[in-house]
Amino acid sequence: EPEVTQTPSHQVTQMGQEVILRCVPISNHLYFYWYRQILGQKVEFLVSFYNNEISEKSEIFDDQFSVERPDGSNFTLKIRSTKLEDSAMYFCASSEALLGARDRFFGQGTRLTVV
Amino acid sequence: QQPVQSPQAVILREGEDAVINCSSSKALYSVHWYRQKHGEAPVFLMILLKGGEQKGHEKISASFNEKKQQSSLYLTASQLSYSGTYFCGTEWGDDKIIFGKGTRLHILP
């Protein structure tokens, strides 16, 4: 069964450092998403991406965040200068373009720990 | 804008039924239901589109009342594997799902 894969599974980084989280969405999907989940809390929408541009973003997705689809298969989330409060699980998801079938398939997540 | 889920947590014995509710203050385009086990990614259960449809998946079904702007998830004859946190996600015709805070379901043998 096709799946969304994320790497790494766990990353520890020093405050102020840049991190890049990587995702390989399901190959025929056209919509891509990043969500984050702080430990014990709900899943929060960060950004959606379609046709090589951001289609929606939340208030959380400020100037320190950026997304890219550099090579047609990877979908990356970059955090420029990490803060302690960026520590969370980051989930990538993808979905088909068909209306009514836009269920999101989630990856297993990257646990980001900022120290 | 965040949907409101109730109850916050449920403890059941295996074989009992549960209902989890999700309501919105705005008219909905669709409702998504996910289950998340501790330390794992959310797993998609089902999506319901406006039109008041019901859907089922084994012993888990859901309804969507467009008029009341709410959806309910029904778990019948619960199994141990149903334990986890259930999230509803609401969509208003744009390209993002906003999740509720989740309902923790714990099934006792």
Image (cartoon, coloured by chain):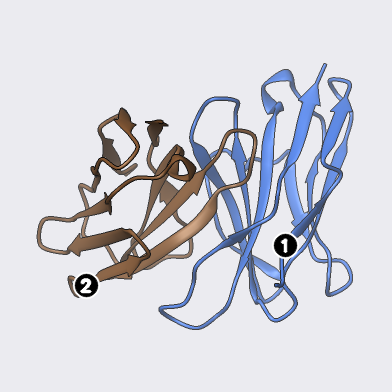
* Type of the residue with mark 1: Val
Q: Is residue A92 above or below residue A103?
A: above
Classed neighbour count for the residue bearing mark 1: other residues with Cα under 10 Å, few (<14), some (14–19), many (≥20): some
Chain letter for mark 1, please: A
The C terminus of chain A is located in which quarter? top right
Residue B100, x across and y down, in percent: 37, 41
- Give the labeled residue for mark 2: B53
Q: Is residue B100 above or below residue A88?
A: below
Colour of the chain lettered B: brown
Q: Which chain shows up in blue? A: A
Q: Is residue B96 left or right of residue A80?
A: left
Q: Is residue A4 left or right of residue B25?
A: right
Mark count:
2
The residue that appears at 73% across and 19% down in the rendered structure is A84
In which quadrant of the rendered view does residue B8 lie?
top left
Residue A86, x across and y down, in percent: 70, 28
Residue A108, x across and y down, in percent: 70, 49
The residue that appears at 72% across and 72% down in the rendered structure is A2
Nearer the observer, A11 or A69: A11
Q: Secondary structure at mark 2?
A: loop
Nearer the observer, A115 or A104: A104
* Type of the residue with mark 2: Glu
In which quadrant of the rendered view does residue A20 lie?
top right
Residue B68, x across and y down, in percent: 11, 56
Q: CA distance from mark 2 to mark 1?
A: 29 Å
Chain letter for mark 2, please: B
In which quadrant of the rendered view does residue A40 lie?
top right
Q: Secondary structure at mark 1?
A: loop
- Give the labeled residue for mark 1: A4
The N terminus of chain A is located in which quarter? bottom right
